[in-house]
Image: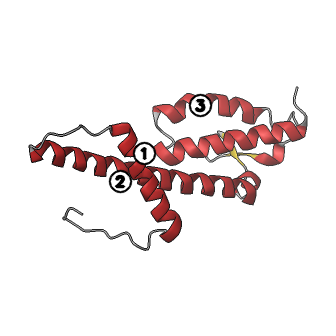
């Protein structure tokens, strides 16, 4: 059994998880549908467990998070911080992958041979350089060359 406080935290956790899944893929995806049934079961327990104020009935008759849950500043900050972290990690990873691939292609095409690039080590070095740059300058030095290669 859960106390009302524990159950409220469980509903917060379910809300956060659902937002991460649907924010990335949408509500009608197989991944989101995988968790929809368990979400409904948990929402059905809200009233008996003293948390009726955290759940409402949606326009389709299914239970949904109430405005109290949706507008919770603490939860929205967690979701915002998560989105921000995902952005930066994805940006660094993609830029580093691109740069490593370009280095490997140049080495291969140069015909000079030489020692092969230790991809894992070099990728880590490139990522570290991007992290240093973004921590110092944010996006101030980023230029987008449309249709070009930078």
Between 38 and 88, the one lying in front of the other is: 88
- The label on residue 35 is 3
Residue picked out by circle 2: 95
Q: Which residue is mark 1?
A: 124
Q: Quadrant of the C terminus?
A: bottom left
Q: Where does the N terminus fall, quadrant-wise? A: top right
Residue 50 in view in this figure: no
Determine the residue positioned at 79% across, 41% down. 9
**Residue 148 picture quarter:** bottom left
Q: Nearer the viewer, residue 24 or 64?
A: 24
The Cα–Cα distance between marks 3 and 2, rounded to whole angstroms, is: 33 Å
> Nearer the N terminus, badge 1 or badge 2?
2
Q: Is 147 drawn above or below residue 67 in the view shown?
A: below
Q: Nearer the viewer, mark 1 or mark 3?
A: 1
The kind of secondary structure element at disc 3 is helix
Q: Nearer the viewer, residue 49 or 96?
A: 96
| Mark 3 or 2: the one toward you | 2
Graded by Cα atoms within 10 Å as few (under 14), some (14 to 19) or many (20 or more), the crowding at tag 2 reads some
For this rendering, which residue is in front, 95 or 76? 95
Q: Earlier in the sequence, mark 1 or mark 3?
A: 3
């Amino acid at each position: 059994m859960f106390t009302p406080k524990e159950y409220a935290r469980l509903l917060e956790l379910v809300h956060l998880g659902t937002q991460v899944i649907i924010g990335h893929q949408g509500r009608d995806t197989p991944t989101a549908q995988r968790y929809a049934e368990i979400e409904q079961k948990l929402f059905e327990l809200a009233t008996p467990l003293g948390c009726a104020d955290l759940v409402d009935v949606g326009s389709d008759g299914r239970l949904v998070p109430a405005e109290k849950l949706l507008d919770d500043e603490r939860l929205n900050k967690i979701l915002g911080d998560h989105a921000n972290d995902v952005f930066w990690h994805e940006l660094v990873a993609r830029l580093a992958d691109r740069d490593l691939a370009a280095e490997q292609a140049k080495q291969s095409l140069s015909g000079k041979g030489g020692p092969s690039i230790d991809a894992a080590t070099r990728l880590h070095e490139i990522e570290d350089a991007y992290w240093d740059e973004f921590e110092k300058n944010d996006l101030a030095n980023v230029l987008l060359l449309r249709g070009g290669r930078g």
